[in-house]
Amino acid sequence: MPPLLAASAVTKSYGGVRALRHVDFELHSGEIHALVGENGAGKSTLIRIFAGAAQADSGEVRFEGQPVTLHDPLAAKALGIAVIYQQPALFGELTVAENIGLSLESGGLWRRIHWKQRSRLARELLAQLGSTIDPERRAAALSMPEQQTVEIAKSLGARARVLILDEPTASLSEREVNALFGVLRDLRRRGVGMIYVSHRLEELPEIADRVTVLRDGETVQTRAMAEVDRATLIRMMVGRDLDAVFPKRAVPAGHVVLETRGLTCPAAGVKNVSITARAGEIVGLSGLVGAGRTELAEVLFGLHRPSSGSILLRGKTVNITSPQDAVRLGIAYVPEDRRRHGLLMPMSVAENVALAQLATASGLQKLHEQGEYQNADDYRNRLAIKTSSVATPVQTLSGGNQQKVCLARWLTAAPALLILDEPTQGVDIGAKAEIHRLMSDLAAGGMAIVMISSELPEILGMSDRIYVMRSGAVAGEVSRAEATQERLLALALGEAGAPA
Ligand SMILES: Nc1ncnc2c1ncn2[C@@H]1O[C@H](COP(=O)(O)OP(=O)(O)OP(=O)(O)O)[C@@H](O)[C@H]1O
Ligand SMILES: [Mg+2]
């Protein structure tokens, strides 16, 4: 039997950048095929070609052995190829049910007519994913993981034969990942072929049957997943041995930089939060998706007004009514959703990195352009941002490299308090260790860091102290010495033994 979907000798360039070079890839029905590689290796480009969203310069794509020309996404959709992109692409002004409905119906007429059925269908599809998102909510109001869940529900409804997932778990926590894996295994039994892109290498043995590694736009190898261990996989990805774990450094904690007392904001669902973060400390915020961690960060950054409680910086009560206030007071926030309040896509890497500094400089004095380039170039080297020059527009960078630019911007601002929401989501294994190293350096330099992460190993590895949030409140505080996966999960789930 010919493979369900195949690429042979596919080549694709963007201007002078060779994104793919003679790439071979085969997907069988009933298989979950992992596609891995460093940021900028070409994973999303290959996916866009299978999805009809980009055209190969040369080479061939075959569906069930027949060469096919995928001129546009509709051609791919007609073959039963569904894609969940790295960046969810929902219509913000429409509801969840409308988004799901529209993707399943081709005509626009359907809108408004069967809203009841549509709502029921959306609810059913979401329930299969173990989600309770209200189908009548507007998509713009959804968090990043919620948007991803809706995207997956859309493809479930489409009954795809090929399902391509570009980093679906990047912003999901353990529980959501398990629900997703359940769904994927079910689809596998029904003969669906799946391409699964992820930087979370530890989850691959659990879900993937085979793995293909791309490096610099070329296929390195395809192997049975059971045959390769993590070290082998990393060596195939980066072309050398890499000690990808950065050890945490002990830094003596200094004065209290941030303190909240009974901070409450009903609009954001934040309830009676009292936390502290000291200079030199990395404070982890753990919890399930929807536990209120991002919302707490947004209150601290002036995106929501608290109704009661207070925020103190270096012991003084402050009134933060806008992000401008927060920045002026020395708070920086790297959000998880870099599209929504992150990067200015048409602008260059250097301009994007310099933006935070513009915001901190009084009177908007513009940095000397030379310095702007120098600084951006430094970060390009430190974080291995893959781009030919810092003058390149951010929109042409791969997803993980955009995330690094976002981080570089706020590190440039040298804040007193740095709030990071999923700082290593979507970045490759080498860059992740480099980001952890940078965080340790910054803490050693006296910065207080609050890190939100859904990856328990990251929380356990990097935090001096951990607050676990549940339903908008702090469910518990755990020191580095006491912290274990089990203890954090028990607190996050509100299980017996954990204080209510
Ligand atoms: N529209 C574009 N214009 C110019 N260059 C592009 C464009 N799209 C991708 N590239 C380049 O092609 C290369 C491969 O990018 P791609 O997005 O496929 O990487 P990726 O493996 O998905 O990385 P990541 O893990 O960061 O998502 C990168 O060097 C990227 O900058
Ligand atoms: Mg990508």
Image (spheres, rainbow, N blue to C red):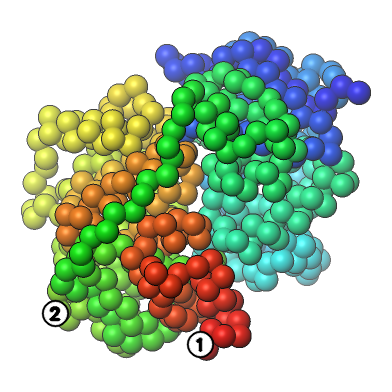
Query: Does any atom of ligand 1 lie closer than 8 Å to the CB of label 2?
Result: no
Which SS class for mark 2? strand
Q: Which residue is mark 2?
A: 316
Checking the image for residue 499, the label placed there is 1
Residue 315: quadrant of the picture: bottom left
**Closer to us: 236 or 156:** 236
- Image point (68%, 67%), residue name: 131
- Image point (60%, 82%), residue name: 495
Q: Is residue 94 above or below residue 308?
A: above
Checking the image for residue 346, the label placed there is none
Choose the circle earlier in sequence order: 1 or 2: 2
Question: Which amino acid type is shown beneath numbered disc 1?
Answer: Pro
Residue 288: quadrant of the picture: bottom right
Residue 386 percent coordinates (x, y) = 38, 28
- Image point (57%, 81%), residue name: 494
| Crowd tier of the residue under label 2, counting other residues whose Cα lies within 10 Å: few below 14, some 14–19, many 20 or above | few
Residue 261 percent coordinates (x, y) = 29, 85
Q: Is residue 17 above or below residue 269?
A: above
- Image point (70%, 60%), residue name: 179
| Crowd tier of the residue under label 1, counting other residues whose Cα lies within 10 Å: few below 14, some 14–19, many 20 or above | few
**Closer to us: 117 or 1:** 1
Which SS class for mark 1? loop
- Report whether residue 303 is seen: no
Q: Is residue 477 above or below residue 118?
A: below
Q: Is residue 228 left or right of residue 394?
A: right
Question: Which amino acid type is shown beneath numbered disc 2?
Answer: Lys
Q: CA distance from mark 1 to mark 2?
A: 31 Å
Residue 471 percent coordinates (x, y) = 52, 79
Q: Considering the image in quadrants, where does the N terminus appear?
A: top right
Q: Is residue 294 left or right of residue 224?
A: left
Q: Is residue 111 left or right of residue 19?
A: right
